[in-house]
């Protein structure tokens, strides 16, 4: 089965223009592993979403099937083979 990682417009250029990155999963996996698989070919994209410790960056939100991963279990949040993961850049300003 295929989980999907959906990218916002601002990050698509870092993934050769892809709006979605499919990740083949045969069983449930931690979000961190799914992001590693999805971002493997694009290390710059990976560094924009996760910090040097592998955690989701403060200015990025990641949702797994509509649930905020930061409020759940962070990069240990469970992703199933049918899940949709949305990566969203936080918007700020004044």
Image (cartoon, grey):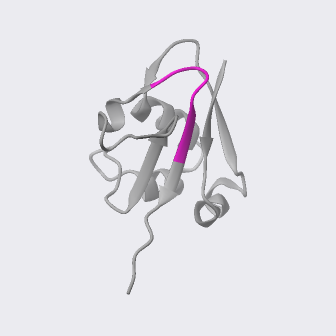
Asked whether, in this view, residue 16 is left or right of residue 52, the answer is right
- x%, y% of residue 5? 59, 40
Residue most extreme to the left: 53
33 and 4: which one is in front? 4
Q: Which quarter of the rendered picture does the N terminus lie within?
A: top right
- x%, y% of residue 77? 37, 30
Asked whether, in this view, residue 94 is left or right of residue 71, the answer is right
Numbered disc total: 0
Q: Which quarter of the rendered picture does the C terminus lie within?
A: bottom left
Quarter occupied by residue 71: top left
Give the magenta range. 79-86
Residue at coordinates 35% horizontally, 49% vertically from top-left?
56
- Residue 83 falls inside the magenta stretch: yes
- x%, y% of residue 64? 48, 36
- Residue 49 falls inside the magenta stretch: no
Quarter occupied by residue 83: top right
Residue most extreme to the front: 66
Residue at coordinates 45% horizontally, 59% vertically from top-left?
48
Residue at coordinates 33% horizontally, 30% vertically from top-left?
76
Residue at coordinates 58% horizontally, 12% vertically from top-left?
26
Indicate whether 16 appears above or below 2: below
Residue most extreme to the bottom: 94
């Amino acid at each position: 089965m295929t989980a999907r990682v959906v990218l916002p417009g601002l990050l698509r250029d870092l993934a050769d223009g892809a709006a979605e990155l499919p990740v083949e999963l045969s069983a449930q996996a931690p979000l961190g592993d799914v992001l590693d698989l999805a971002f493997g070919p694009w290390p710059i994209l990976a560094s924009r979403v996760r910090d040097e410790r592998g955690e989701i960056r403060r200015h990025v939100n990641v949702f797994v099937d509509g649930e905020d991963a930061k409020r759940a279990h962070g990069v240990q949040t469970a992703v199933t083979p049918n899940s949709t993961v949305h990566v969203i850049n936080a918007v700020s300003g004044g």
